[in-house]
Every structure is written in structure tokens, then in C-alpha cells.
């Protein structure tokens, strides 16, 4: 399609004008243009964090000589013709504004050549004033050089962050597009030094390392490909053993466009429910592909937000795909016998009274990566567990059990938390929640902040069987508590929950409920150090077997560690 100035009614249908805010926005727009032009190789050169120079060259289709001046005009684009095209956008750009906006605040040079032209065309613009187009020798493709960004708008220069921050943002954009377009080779040089390179061989995992580090990238789980679905979700998610303390590790692309969308963040976070510890967040890079008419990209000036025509359908597919991938791989970590245990015994032989349980607990908690193992999940149960026979209790804390394929150590507290959690959530779903009315309502006084956070979580607490109401100032009245907490003092129980609230960063209603439920169960569960009779141990194992996710506690820690027959044999030297 030739470049044309958009008719007024189309131009005015376009979401608010684009503003070039910072060097990274220039890099982003120029890279998008190169991708729209079908480039296979994109080179980005940056000096002084983009203030001195941003140069992007590509081997794409180029611009015909006679259209070069138009490319720099406002609302001139080759990507859109009629207003209705706005409802089925297949390109990254569509507003015909980026080059004009960049040229208005810099000294810009554009050189471009199509395969049909035997020479290239060069045009220079300074602060929006375009010079005459001139012929010049050039390879097929386009090269844009942006010098002295914001030389004529000092106010915007002042708003730039430190060079390091600006460089990081530039690198982020290049990395994002390298992920979204694995068949395009990207090279980013900052002040003459190569900062990022992707060979364009189609391997996304290679790019992941730049985003998350080599170790985490190796461990990321690939979602299955379903090439025929109309809503396709592909990409990578972190296993529950790898997490972060914030949501910044979540990256989404819709039809090849990087977007920020809280509902997608929520969908992925939901898929990890009960697999991650409270306050931990997964990492993910997801590519969501839908027919172009199923998504509106014309809603945000920087095109960083989209609106799905059927958000429910998309979010459901995202959540289901991620959840299935996670459950498909959840296996109890294998025990590293070599370390913690051997150390425990060495203590004993050296005359130290018994193994150091605290150290052993700590070591067990920091177990290495899960090793794949063959369990036979019972049909219908997500990542089920084998039938286990209780053998005994160790340190009043772990159950030792025998299974069809070796030895299991079960954390009694974590296991009981899981059992209670599933019971509570099931009751909640069936509306058969058991709660215990107090004979005398009790009042609880909280700090101002605690009161505020409690206020905002009242609905979730009520849904879980707390009958709590504001009682003036920062005081609350408790009339009932969930049955499973009946052994505790209501005030105590509420206090613990409130203390935890303060760390929460405004999550979603459903997430809040699951978190509160997890905390309730933590309070109610059998503690470490509590001696259990063999019958009680066996009952706990039976209850755990009945769970749909028996292998992790609601906070995402493993409930069990497996030592296979094979590894026992190896440890005892019966097998090579
Ligand atoms: P938009 O991308 O929204 O169309 P731009 O101002 O970014 O607006 O670009 C204007 C036009 O210039 C594009 O529609 C395209 O035809 C042309 N153009 C810009 N950059 C390139 C490039 N790297 N290769 C080929 N054509 C380009
Ligand atoms: Mg563009």
C-alpha cells in the first residue's frame, strides 16, 4: 500500500496523539517500523543513552523514492486506508505519526531504498523542517538516524532519567521485540559495545536468558503449541520453584505487540494459586494470538494497551493453558541425600547429641530443582500421589512413608495445611462453610493501617466464615470464626491475619480469599514438633491423597520429598 495522508475522519478516529517521551520510545517506534517493513535483520546503535544518537537500520522493503517525504508527514501511513481498517490492525504501526513526531524534536536523517529502485533516497529534517530529498547510494532497506533528541525541547530533556535507566529501557524494548520476533535478528550497540544480539534462528529460549538470566531461562516451562485454535497462547512460564517478589517478570504480547494488561497479569497469577508462597509472583512471557478483528489496539497513545472484544474467552484460555502446564510438571523434589543427612550423621558420630534439626529443616527447605520422576497420578486427580503406608515420624515433624517406588518424607505441617485448605475451599464453593458462633462477641482494636486493610478485606473474610463488623474507630467486633480455627482465640486468629494483610499490594478478590484461606489453614494446621500416633499419621496420608494438589502446601512449598528405590540403590552402591 502506498503512503498516503489519512483523511481527516480517519485521523480523528485515532487515539490521542503519540508523544515521544524518551529515547526508548524512539527505539520502539523505529523498530516497529522495521518489523512492519518485513525486516530480517535490525541493527540499533545508541550513543549517550540515546541523547546523542539513535540509529536503526533494517533490510526491510524500503520506501519508494517519491514517498520518502510523505513518510515524515503527520498522519501519513501506508498501513491504514479507511476508518474501518482500524478494527482489524495487522501491523505494529497505524497512526502515521511516529516519524513526524520524532523529527519534530530532533535532527533526523532517513535513507531508504526499495528493491525496485536502483538508488536510495535521503532526506534530512531538523526540528520538523524537512530539507529536499536527494538520491544517494544505499542498500535495500531503511536507515533512520536520530541525533540530538530534544535539542529544541529542553523541558523533555530534564525529564530523562539517569543514563543507566534510559539504557535499560532501550534494552528492554529491544529484548521484548526479539522475543516476539524470534526469526528476526536484532543487534543493539550502546556506545559502541554490543549489549544485545539475537541470531534470528527462531529460538526464543536464547532471548529469555537476556530477560531472566540463564538459570531461570533454562527452567522456564514451555506452553504447548496449539496451532489451530483461534485464541492461541504460547510462550513460557516459571515453574513454582522459581519466583519473584513482584509482578514485573510478567510479559505479554498480543498479536506481536507488547502490552500491559492487569487482567492478563491476574489470569496468570490465578493459574499459580496455591503453588506459590504468599507475596511471590511468577515469571512469564506469553504470546497471545487472536484474529485481528478480535482485539482493539487503538485505545492507548503508546499502543501499550489493547481491548479484547471477548476478554473472558481470552483470559480463560490463558489461565487454563498456564495451569495445565504447571500441573503437568509438578513433582516432589528428590532428596539430596549427599548433604543434609550425611551431615546430620557426622554430627552424631562426632559426639554431638543428635542431628541438628533446624539445619536439617533449613536444608530440606532449600532443596534443589525438582527431578523428574514417574509417579502414577490417579485418574481425575491433578498431579496425584501414590498410596502411601505410614512408617513413622522423625523429629516430631516429618512422616516417613513407604510408596510403591521408594521412600517419602512428608512435612506434617505443610501436608495438613494442604488438607485443610482444600477442605475449606470446597466448603466455600458448596456454600457449606462451617463456622463457629462465639457466645460473646469479642472486640479487637487495631492500628489505623491495620484497620484500613482489614476494612478492605472484610468481604473475603466473611466469605470464609468470619463474622466481623466495624465497631467504630479502629475497632472491630467478631461474632463468628471459621470452624477450623475454633481451637484458637478469635482475637489471636484475626491479629495474625491482619498482620499479613499489610504486605499485600491490592490483589484481586479471588486471590485475596485464597490467601486468607491459606493463612487460616496455616494457623489451624498441626505444627512441626507435634507428636502423632501411627493412626493419626496414616489418616493424614489418606487425607492428603484425597487432595487435588497434594504435593505442595497452599503457600507453594513441597509437602513431600521422594527418594526413589533407584536412588537408594545408588546411594548404597548396589547400582552404578
Ligand atoms: P506508521 O508506522 O504508523 O505508519 P510512521 O510515522 O512510523 O507511521 O511511518 C510512516 C510510514 O513510513 C509508514 O507507514 C511506512 O510506510 C513508512 N516507513 C517508516 N519506517 C519504515 C521502514 N523502516 N521501512 C519501510 N517503510 C517505513
Ligand atoms: Mg510506525
Image: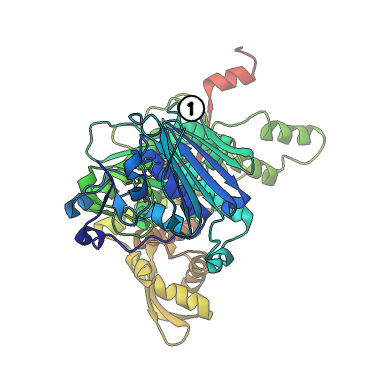
Is label 1 in a helix, a strand or a loop?
loop
Q: Is residue 268 toward the left or the right of residue 355 in the image?
A: left
Q: Residue at x 82, y 34 (%)?
A: 350
Task: Looking at this view, name the residue that lies furthest to the bottom.
Answer: 472
- Is 499 in front, or is 212? 212
Q: Which residue is mark 1?
A: 372
Crowding around mark 1 (Cα neighbors within 10 Å: few <14, some 14 to 19, many 20+) is few
Counting from the top left corner in percent of width and height, residue 32 is at 40, 44
Q: Is residue 527 toward the left or the right of residue 426 in the image?
A: right
Q: Residue at x 56, y 67 (%)?
A: 154
What colour scheme does the image use?
Answer: rainbow
Q: Is residue 295 toward the left or the right of residue 150 in the image?
A: left
Is residue 348 depicted above or below 19 in this figure? above
Name the quadrant of the N terminus: top left
Counting from the top left corner in percent of width and height, residue 136 is at 46, 36
* Label 1 CB less than 8 angstroms from ligand 2: no
Name the quadrant of the C terminus: top right
Is residue 315 depicted above or below 373 in this figure? below
Counting from the top left corner in percent of width and height, residue 539 is at 42, 43
- Is 258 in front, or is 190? 190
- Is 307 in front, or is 35? 35
Is residue 359 depicted above or below 483 in this figure? above
Does the image show residue 549? no
Does the image show residue 60? yes
Q: Is residue 545 toward the left or the right of residue 297 in the image?
A: right
* Image quadrant in which you'd find residue 165: bottom right
Counting from the top left corner in percent of width and height, residue 83 is at 19, 55
Amino acid at each position: 500500500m502506498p503512503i498516503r495522508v489519512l483523511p481527516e475522519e480517519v485521523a480523528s478516529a485515532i487515539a490521542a496523539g503519540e508523544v515521544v517521551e524518551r529515547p526508548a520510545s524512539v527505539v520502539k517506534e523505529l523498530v516497529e517500523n522495521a518489523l512492519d517493513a518485513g525486516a530480517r535483520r535490525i541493527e540499533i546503535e545508541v550513543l549517550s543513552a540515546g541523547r546523542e544518537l539513535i540509529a536503526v537500520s533494517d533490510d526491510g522493503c524500503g520506501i519508494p523514492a517519491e514517498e520518502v517525504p510523505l513518510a515524515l508527514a503527520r498522519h501519513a501511513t501506508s498501513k491504514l486506508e479507511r476508518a474501518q481498517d482500524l478494527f482489524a490492525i495487522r501491523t505494529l504501526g497505524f497512526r502515521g505519526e511516529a516519524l513526524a513526531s520524532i523529527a519534530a524534536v530532533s535532527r533526523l536523517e532517513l535513507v531508504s531504498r526499495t528493491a525496485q529502485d536502483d538508488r536510495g533516497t535521503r532526506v534530512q529534517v531538523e526540528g520538523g523542517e524537512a530539507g529536499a530529498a536527494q538520491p544517494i547510494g544505499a542498500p535495500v532497506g531503511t536507515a533512520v538516524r536520530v541525533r540530538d533528541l530534544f535539542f529544541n525541547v529542553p523541558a523533555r530533556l530534564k525529564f530523562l532519567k539517569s543514563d543507566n535507566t534510559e539504557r535499560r529501557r532501550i534494552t528492554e524494548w529491544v529484548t521484548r521485540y526479539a522475543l516476539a520476533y524470534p526469526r528476526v535478528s536484532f543487534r543493539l550497540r550502546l556506545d559502541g559495545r554490543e549489549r544485545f544480539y539475537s541470531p534470528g534462528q527462531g529460538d526464543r529460549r536464547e532471548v529469555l536468558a537476556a530477560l531472566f538470566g540463564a538459570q531461570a531461562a533454562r527452567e522456564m516451562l514451555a506452553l504447548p503449541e496449539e496451532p489451530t485454535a483461534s485464541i492461541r497462547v504460547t510462550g513460557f512460564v516459571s515453574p513454582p520453584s522459581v519466583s519473584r517478589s513482584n509482578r514485573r517478570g510478567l510479559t505479554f504480547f498480543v498479536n506481536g505487540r507488547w502490552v500491559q494488561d492487569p487482567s492478563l497479569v491476574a489470569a496468570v497469577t490465578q493459574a499459580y494459586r496455591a503453588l506459590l508462597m504468599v507475596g511471590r509472583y511468577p515469571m512469564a512471557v506469553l504470546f497471545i494470538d487472536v484474529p485481528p478483528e478480535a482485539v482493539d489496539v487503538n485505545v492507548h497513545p503508546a499502543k501499550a494497551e489493547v481491548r479484547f472484544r471477548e476478554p473472558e474467552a481470552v483470559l480463560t484460555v490463558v489461565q487454563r493453558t498456564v495451569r495445565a502446564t504447571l500441573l503437568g510438571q509438578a513433582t516432589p523434589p528428590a532428596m539430596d541425600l549427599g548433604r543434609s543427612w550425611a551431615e546430620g550423621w557426622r554430627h552424631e558420630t562426632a559426639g554431638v547429641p543428635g542431628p541438628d534439626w533446624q539445619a536439617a529443616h533449613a536444608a530440606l527447605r532449600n532443596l534443589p530443582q525438582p527431578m523428574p520422576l514417574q509417579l502414577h497420578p490417579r485418574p481425575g486427580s491433578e498431579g496425584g500421589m501414590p498410596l502411601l503406608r505410614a512408617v513413622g515420624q522423625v523429629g516430631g515433624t516429618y512422616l516417613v512413608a513407604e510408596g510403591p517406588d521408594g521412600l517419602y518424607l512428608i512435612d506434617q505441617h505443610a501436608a495438613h495445611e494442604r488438607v485443610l485448605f482444600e477442605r475449606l475451599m470446597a466448603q466455600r464453593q458448596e456454600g457449606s462453610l462451617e463456622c463457629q458462633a462465639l457466645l460473646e462477641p469479642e472486640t479487637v482494636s487495631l492500628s489505623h493501617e491495620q484497620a484500613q486493610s482489614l476494612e478492605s478485606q472484610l468481604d473475603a473474610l466473611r466469605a470464609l466464615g468470619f463474622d466481623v463488623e466495624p465497631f467504630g474507630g479502629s475497632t472491630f467486633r467478631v461474632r463468628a470464626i471459621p470452624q477450623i480455627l475454633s481451637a484458637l482465640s478469635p482475637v489471636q486468629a484475626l491479629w495474625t491475619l491482619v498482620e499479613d494483610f499489610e504486605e499485600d499490594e491490592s490483589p484481586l478478590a479471588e486471590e485475596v480469599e485464597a490467601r486468607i484461606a491459606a493463612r487460616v489453614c496455616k494457623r489451624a494446621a498441626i505444627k512441626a514438633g507435634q507428636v502423632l500416633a501411627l493412626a493419626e499419621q496414616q489418616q493424614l496420608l489418606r487425607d492428603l491423597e484425597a487432595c487435588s494438589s497434594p504435593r505442595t502446601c497452599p503457600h507453594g512449598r513441597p509437602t513431600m520429598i521422594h527418594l526413589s528405590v533407584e536412588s537408594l540403590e545408588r546411594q548404597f552402591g548396589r547400582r552404578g
